[in-house]
């Protein structure tokens, strides 16, 4: 599927930025699996998970060998990070 979105020229977003933002929202809504959101964002699961950590959407793993897919799906959906 291909979707075309015309964005204003003065918008400081790249295609990659838009893909990542959309992937984050769909992940938070549990609309798509981790595999699908990382395909949409065109980044690895580890990189996507790090973005979620950086934005305080999910917490870092307790154990270094935890898999991002397990951690993301175990988190409750949140639209905004806690202040």
Image: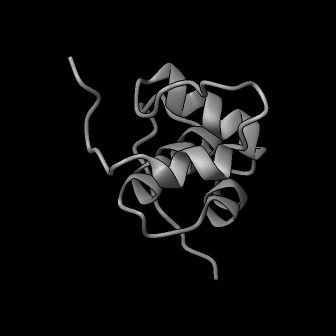
Q: Is residue 24 left or right of residue 81?
A: right
Name the residue at the bottom extreme.
1
Q: Is residue 35 visible?
A: yes
Give whichever of 23, 82 is nearer the camera: 82
The answer to which quarter of the image holds residue 29 is bottom left
Q: Is residue 67 left or right of residue 9?
A: right
Name the residue at the left extreme.
83
x and y percentages locating residue 21 in the rendered image = 47, 44
Is the N terminus in the top left, top right, bottom left or bottom right quadrant? bottom right
* Residue 60, placed above or below residue 40: above
Is the C terminus in the top left, top right, bottom left or bottom right quadrant? top left
| Residue drawn where x is 70% and y is 63% of the image | 35
Total tally of numbered discs in the picture = 0
| Residue drawn where x is 69% and y is 26% of the image | 63
Give whichever of 52, 42 is nearer the camera: 52
Give whichever of 52, 13 is nearer the camera: 52
x and y percentages locating residue 69 in the rendered image = 65, 52
Q: Is residue 80 left or right of residue 67?
A: left
x and y percentages locating residue 64 in the rendered image = 75, 24
Give whichever of 78, 60 is nearer the camera: 60
| Residue drawn where x is 51% and y is 55% of the image | 73
* Residue 1, placed above or below residue 51: below
Q: Is residue 66 left or right of residue 50?
A: right
| Residue drawn where x is 57% and y is 29% of the image | 51
* Residue 6, placed above or below residue 81: below
x and y percentages locating residue 5 in the rendered image = 47, 62
The answer to which quarter of the image holds residue 40 is bottom right
Q: Is residue 23 visible?
A: no
The coloring applied to the image is: one colour
């Amino acid at each position: 599927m291909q979707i075309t979105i015309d964005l204003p020229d003065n918008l400081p977003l790249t295609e990659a930025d838009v893909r990542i933002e959309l992937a984050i929202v769909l992940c938070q809504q549990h609309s798509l699996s981790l595999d699908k959101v990382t395909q949409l964002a065109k980044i690895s699961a580890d990189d996507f998970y790090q973005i979620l950590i950086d934005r305080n959407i999910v917490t870092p793993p307790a154990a270094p060998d935890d898999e991002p897919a397990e951690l993301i799906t175990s988190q409750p959906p949140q639209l905004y990070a806690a202040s």
